[in-house]
């Protein structure tokens, strides 16, 4: 029996900053951001979008197409949590009318969170093939104004349905994992923005990629040429490009060209959204599925990295007819519907969104009809509403 990804939903908020504007405002050469970092736009979340609302919106993309009575598990991976105790997934359950019998909780290990959820969900469905699982990754990457990491911010969510006999990607059993207790990137409870040792984090990312990729190939007796695509967690797209360069360094021209082409297809969405932490690898997957020239059964290698640090390499095979499950026009429409912010507007919104919500103050959203948003706090309880 095959188990894997059957549906993918995506949401990113309705505002963005253009990297050329940001470079000019920060006295940087725009090519540093466009080429050196590999980003063109970054989504900005205002105070009405948080991990919960974005997760609801991503799941809304497919929830009406599934049998809700079969959902036995829902896991929410995030490092932008809104509560130290209550899981973000419970708000999603209520908003989307999922049944009370669902087992649901939140997980955390930086950007690895959604992969952790996906792995647990896959094991769950292997044991309970008549049930399905929803896994959600939802995050806002915030480093702060005028910081080195500012150009690598972003916001968004990916939600996936995991099922037996999946329609998009059948996940293969086995994986290569690697972890170490290090301080490359972290966010203590008393800080709304991340702390980071930027250059070190990029070195660890590449080191963990090499370790897990080589180990996986050894375990499965595979060669790099056997992969039809390699995709990566993309904190900024140049990071994935560097990993991909390592992967193809000793390969023939044909293999290098094939894997460079698929990498280009996989980065198209991230270039325009920015880092979405837990959801980032799966945004690469969505981008590859939409833009790559994939054939049924093609082998995709996925590299997941979460600072702190935990990495995993695993694979899946593309399922025949996967394109029918995708909605590229809807994804593009969402990106196109974003409003471009001036840098002063972005700075105001960014600062506002760092502030704690004011008790009793109702927030309104400028999103399209149907979008869920954070509406404020009443008696200490967070309220979510649909526009
Ligand atoms: P920086 O110091 O601003 O940039 O920091 P730089 O000076 O290293 O330049 C970046 C690149 O631009 C260099 O290329 C320059 O040569 C090039 P590279 O050597 O890397 O190939 N450059 C130019 N190119 C063309 N034209 C020009 C030009 N000028 C310079 N004119 C850094 C960059 C990424 C460190 C910073 O933005 C940062 O700290 N970001 C946040 C940390 C991060 O994203 N780390 C990634 C790995 S860790 C991870 O993925 C986990 C994470 O997602 C969190 C989680 O797990 O939850 C972050």
Image (cartoon, rainbow, N blue to C red):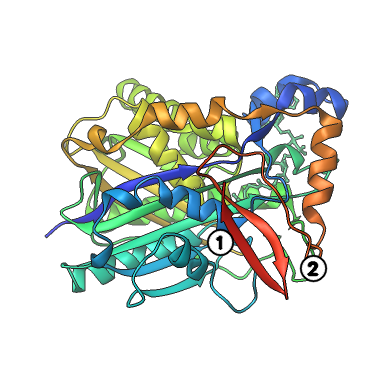
Total count of labels: 2
Among all residues in the image, which is located at the extreme left? 1
Task: Determine whether the residue tagged by mark 2 lies in a helix, strand or loop.
Answer: loop
Instruction: From the viewer's side, name the closer residue of 63 and 255.
Output: 63
- The residue that mark 2 highlights is 359
Query: Which quarter of the image is occupied by the N terminus?
Result: bottom left
Q: Is mark 1 within 8 Å of ligand 1?
A: no
Asked whether, in this view, residue 239 is left or right of residue 363, the answer is left
Residue 34 lies, with reference to residue 98, above or below; the image says above
Q: Position of residue 332 (x, y in %)?
A: 47, 27
The residue drawn where x is 65% and y is 76% is 84
Q: Is residue 333 above or below residue 108?
A: above
**Which residue is located at x 35 percent, y 30 percent?**
290
x then y, percent, for residue 285? 39, 40
Q: Residue at x 72, y 26 (%)?
A: 19
Q: Which residue is mark 1?
A: 78
Q: Is mark 2 within 8 Å of ligand 1?
A: no
Q: Position of residue 26 (x, y in %)?
A: 86, 30
Whether residue 266 appears in this view of the structure is yes
Give the image location of residue 243, x and y in percent: 50, 40
Residue at x 57% of width, y 51% of height: 277
Which quarter of the picture shows residue 17? top right
**Ligand 1 is located in which of the four quadrants?**
top right
Q: Residues within 10 Å of mark 1 (few under 14, many from 20)?
A: many
Residue 172 seen in the figure: no
Circle nearer the N terminus (2, 1): 1
Q: Which mark is residue 355?
A: none
């Amino acid at each position: 029996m095959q188990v894997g990804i059957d549906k993918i939903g995506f949401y990113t908020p309705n505002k963005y900053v253009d990297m050329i504007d940001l470079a000019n405002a920060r006295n940087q050469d725009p090519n540093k951001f466009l080429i050196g970092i590999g980003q063109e736009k970054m989504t900005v979340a205002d105070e009405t979008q948080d991990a919960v609302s974005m997760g609801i919106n991503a799941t809304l993309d497919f929830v009406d197409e599934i049998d809700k009575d079969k959902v036995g598990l829902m896991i929410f991976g995030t490092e932008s949590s809104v509560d130290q105790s209550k899981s973000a997934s419970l708000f999603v359950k209520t908003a989307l009318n999922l049944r009370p019998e669902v087992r649901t909780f939140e997980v955390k290990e930086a950007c690895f969170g959604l992969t952790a959820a996906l792995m647990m969900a896959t094991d769950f469905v292997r044991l309970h093939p008549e049930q399905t699982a929803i896994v959600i990754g939802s995050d806002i990457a915030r480093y702060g104004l005028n910081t080195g990491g500012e150009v690598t911010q972003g916001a968004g969510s990916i939600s996936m349905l995991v099922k037996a006999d999946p329609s998009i990607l059948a996940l293969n059993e086995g994986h290569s994992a690697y972890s170490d207790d290090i301080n490359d990137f972290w966010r203590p409870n008393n800080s709304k923005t991340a702390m980071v040792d930027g250059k070190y984090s990029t070195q660890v990312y590449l080191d963990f990629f090499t370790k897990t990729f080589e180990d996986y190939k050894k375990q499965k007796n595979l060669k790099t040429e056997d992969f039809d695509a390699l995709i990566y967690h993309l904190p900024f797209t140049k990071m994935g490009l560097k990993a991909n360069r390592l992967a193809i360094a000793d390969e023939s021209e044909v293999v290098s060209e094939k894997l460079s082409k698929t990498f280009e297809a996989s980065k198209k969405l991230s270039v325009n959204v920015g880092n979405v932490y837990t959801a980032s690898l799966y945004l690469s997957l969505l981008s590859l599925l939409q833009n790559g020239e994939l054939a049924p059964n093609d082998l995709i290698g996925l590299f997941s990295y979460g600072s702190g640090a935990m990495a995993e390499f695993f694979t899946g095979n593309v399922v025949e007819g996967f394109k029918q499950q995708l909605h590229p026009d809807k994804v593009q429409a969402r990106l196109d519907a974003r409003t471009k912010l001036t840098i002063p507007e972005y700075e105001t919104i960014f600062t506002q969104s760092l502030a704690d919500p004011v008790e009793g103050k109702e927030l309104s959203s400028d999103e399209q009809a149907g979008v869920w948003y954070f509406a404020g706090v009443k008696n200490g309880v967070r309220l979510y509403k649909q526009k």
